[in-house]
Amino acid sequence: MTEFKKNILRVGGTVGVVIILFATFILLFRANISHQTEVIKDLAGRRNLYSQSSQGLAELMKDWSIAQQYKDRVQLLVPKKDDIVLLSKELQARAQKDKVSIVFSFNAESETKVSQGDISSIGFTATVEGAVSDILSFLNEIEESYYALQIQTFDLNTGVANNASLSRFFITGKIFFH
């Protein structure tokens, strides 16, 4: 072999090695770019998920602050069992204010557990006497009270004891508590 052929083979081999190295570099570079693109897409997806989650959390926190405003009022709708003991005294005070008389009692044997959560009920009976307008005023106040009442029977007698302006209401029902 001549020196010229050796040089051509060396240069050709060097160029071939450079081409192979360059091709390998291009393939690895493309693979790295593809990998980095996937990583960037994954990070963008996570960022969107975190953004949506934080927006949802902010909305929940806003809704919670609104719900907190009503928490005390909602808890008053269904009193604790210990609080219904005071109901008889409270009804007596309201009855005096409205110029009616009331006889109120609980029916302990009718205490029941309602299937929804921890809500229970106890039966009651009441007799209210007075002028019809005073009784209606009294009943309106009871209706607006915070106790959860369910009236089951409501019986009206008028003209009790030879007094045509006197009326008597017999009421039975349930009081709900937790």
Image (cartoon, rainbow, N blue to C red):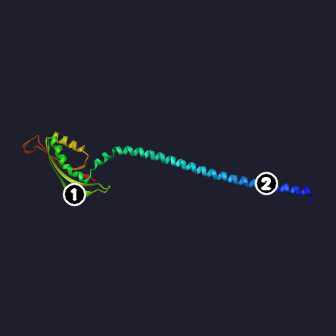
Q: Earlier in the sequence, mark 1 or mark 2?
A: 2
177 or 40: nearer the viewer: 40
Query: SS of the residue at dot 1?
Result: strand
Regarding residue 153, the answer to whether it shows in the image is: no
Give the position of the C terminus as an image quadrant: bottom left
Q: Residue 103, position in %: x, y?
A: 14, 49
The numbered dot on residue 163 is: none
Left or right? Give the position of 133 relative to 29.
left
Q: Please give the name of the residue rendered at 81% of the width and 55% of the height, measured from the top-left corner.
A: 16
Q: Residue 13, position in %: x, y?
A: 83, 57
Q: Within 10 Å of the Cα at label 1, are there few (<14), some (14-19), or many (20+) other Cα atoms?
A: few
Q: Residue 32, position in %: x, y?
A: 66, 53
Regarding residue 29, the answer to whether it shows in the image is: yes
Left or right? Give the position of 100 relative to 64.
left
Q: Residue 24, position in %: x, y?
A: 73, 55
* Quarter occupied by residue 14: bottom right
Q: Please give the name of the residue rendered at 25% of the width and 57% of the height, measured from the top-left corner.
A: 112
Q: Single out the mark in the foreground, 1 or 2.
A: 2
Are the residues flagged by discs 1 and 2 in contact, CB closer than 8 Å?
no
Left or right? Give the position of 63 relative to 122.
right
Query: SS of the residue at dot 2?
Result: helix
- The extreme left residue here reads 162
* Quarter occupied by residue 122: bottom left
Residue at which label 1 appears = 110
CA separation, marks 1 and 2?
97 Å
Q: Please give the name of the residue rendered at 46% of the width and 47% of the height, measured from the top-left corner.
A: 56
Residue at which label 2 appears = 18
11 or 76: nearer the viewer: 11
Disc 2 marks which amino acid? Val
Disc 1 marks which amino acid? Ser
- The extreme bottom residue here reads 1
Left or right? Give the position of 28 relative to 80.
right
